[in-house]
Image: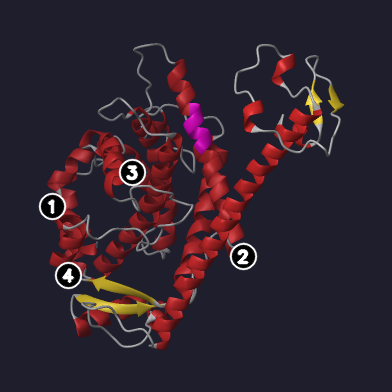
């Protein structure tokens, strides 16, 4: 109706369209001559005179122009804000802007190049030279290296509301994770955290243990050989992505073992294609953030650079898959008979069925943001941990031997399960130390 009216057409009850008579002498109508009463018949629903048609057309143009003006204003505002941020960065890099009062001491000058040249060496050396709380300038951004357990506890637990995440973490402000737990603060974070709690209770997490064990066994049996050489970072990325996909959505990136497939409900239709799409899109997203982290100027995502366009395509692909899964699961729940429990045990199902004290669950947008957050935060970080744990064990053979002996004594040759974790305190210590 909007388009037809703007084109000077009016609808007839029979569905045909005829041109309305235009009259330049009738461009406005007094407000008192208008009626807000709902038309009683179909023929009265549409303009019946040139005056009414022109007036409605002008009103629509005003609405559209107003919306366009607001969009332009928002774009200009975003561009101005981005420019101001980057100008401030350049001032800091040039040394013309002094650090704020109380900012921790640290090395002079911008350290972005040194960090990118050798992250581990740089961070280790910086801690040795400057202590557990160090002020740094990285790409024009003032950041604090927190390498002290008491300071970390203060930031993460004791005064978490003071140390807000907005604009400070890796993903805030990004269309990838939206407003998920990783980046949200305050009341939004608290509500989402309460709604997410059931998905992370011990009983729920234990459900994923068999998937973890069998995926690991598949990797070891198919790829690893004694005396061989492996790129463990690549292997662990593949492993953790498979486990994450299974835990989140109930499907895997490769055929599951027969033992596990009988213990799990069938994956959604098109699961293999969806999994492939997610794998490729997540890889693109991580490449984007890696390049962005090393850039001297961080351009806003809406700017149509090649990197931003590729990233936007990856996010759109993830959105298509994730929203599709959300819609299909909601339809599945709606179609289930009253009192019938759906047999799925993945995180998506847990988040879908979780409600707050008023009986209200997450919106589709909130669900999407939390799933994206878990997908991003749960996969590569775990792969990095496993890679470093293996590297550290290789450099400390006595620790490796003690950990292996503990595993052998606790399992006696059988497959491990979630209940065995309490029997492996030394292995847990190795993991915590690697973290």
Which numbered disc covers residue 425?
Answer: 1
List x then y, in percent, for residue 245. 43, 42
Vertical placement of 133 versus 389: above or below?
below
Residue holding disc 4: 148
The residue carrying pointer 3 sits among few (fewer than 14), some (14 to 19) or many (20 or more) residues within 10 Å by Cα, namely some
Q: Earlier in the sequence, mark 3 or mark 1?
A: 3
The residue carrying pointer 4 sits among few (fewer than 14), some (14 to 19) or many (20 or more) residues within 10 Å by Cα, namely few
Dot 2: few (<14), some (14–19), or many (≥20) neighbours within 10 Å? few
Mark 2 or 1: the one toward you: 2
Q: CA distance from mark 2 to mark 1?
A: 50 Å
Quadrant where the C terminus sits is bottom left
Task: Please tell me whether residue 115 is drawn above or below residue 213 in the rendered image.
Answer: below
Q: Earlier in the sequence, mark 2 or mark 1?
A: 2
Which residue is depicted at the point 35% across and 34% down? Answer: 351
Say left or right for 250 vs 165. Answer: right
CB atoms of marks 1 and 4 within 8 Å: no
- Mark 1 is surrounded, within 10 Å at the Cα level, by few (under 14), some (14 to 19) or many (20 or more) other residues, namely some
Q: Which residue is mark 3?
A: 212
Q: Label 2 belongs to which residue?
A: 305
């Amino acid at each position: 109706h909007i388009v037809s009216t703007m084109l000077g057409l009016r609808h007839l009850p029979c569905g045909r369209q005829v041109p309305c008579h235009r009259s330049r002498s009738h461009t406005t109508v007094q407000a008192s001559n208008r009626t807000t009463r709902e038309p009683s018949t179909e023929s009265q629903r549409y303009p019946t005179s040139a005056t009414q048609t022109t007036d409605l057309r002008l009103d629509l143009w005003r609405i559209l122009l107003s919306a366009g003006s607001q969009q332009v204003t928002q774009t200009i505002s975003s561009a101005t804000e981005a420019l101001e941020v980057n100008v401030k960065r350049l001032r800091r890099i040039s040394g013309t802007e002094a650090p704020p009062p109380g900012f921790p001491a640290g090395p002079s000058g911008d350290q972005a190049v040194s960090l990118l040249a050798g992250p581990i060496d740089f961070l280790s050396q910086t801690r040795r030279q400057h202590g557990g709380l160090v002020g740094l300038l990285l790409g024009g951004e003032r950041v604090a290296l927190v390498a002290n357990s008491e300071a970390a506890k203060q930031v993460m637990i004791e005064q978490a509301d003071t140390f807000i995440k907005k604009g400070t973490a890796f993903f805030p402000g990004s269309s990838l994770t939206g407003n998920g737990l990783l980046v949200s603060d305050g009341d939004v974070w608290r509500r989402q955290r309460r709604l997410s709690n059931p998905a992370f209770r011990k009983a729920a997490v234990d459900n994923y243990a068999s998937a973890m064990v069998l995926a690991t066994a598949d990797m070891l049996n198919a790829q690893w050989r004694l005396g061989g050489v492996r790129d463990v970072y690549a292997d662990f990325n593949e492993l953790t992505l498979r486990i994450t996909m299974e835990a989140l959505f109930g499907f895997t990136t490769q055929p599951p073992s027969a033992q596990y497939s009988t213990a799990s409900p069938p994956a959604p239709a098109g699961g293999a294609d969806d999994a492939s799409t997610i794998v490729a899109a997540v890889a693109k997203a991580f490449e984007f953030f890696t390049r962005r982290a090393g850039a001297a100027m961080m351009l806003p995502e809406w700017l149509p650079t090649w990197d931003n366009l590729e990233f936007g395509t990856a996010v759109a692909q993830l959105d298509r898959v994730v929203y599709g899964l959300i819609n299909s699961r909601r339809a599945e729940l709606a179609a289930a008979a009253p009192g019938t429990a759906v047999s799925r045990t993945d995180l998506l199902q847990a988040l879908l069925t979780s409600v707050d004290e008023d009986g209200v669950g997450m919106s589709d947008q909130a669900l999407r943001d939390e799933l994206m957050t878990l997908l991003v935060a749960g996969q590569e970080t775990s792969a990095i941990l496993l890679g470093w744990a293996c590297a550290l064990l290789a450099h400390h053979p006595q620790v490796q031997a003690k950990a292996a002996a503990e595993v052998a004594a606790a399992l006696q040759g059988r497959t491990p399960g979630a209940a065995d974790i309490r029997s492996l305190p030394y292995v847990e210590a190795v993991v915590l130390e690697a973290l």
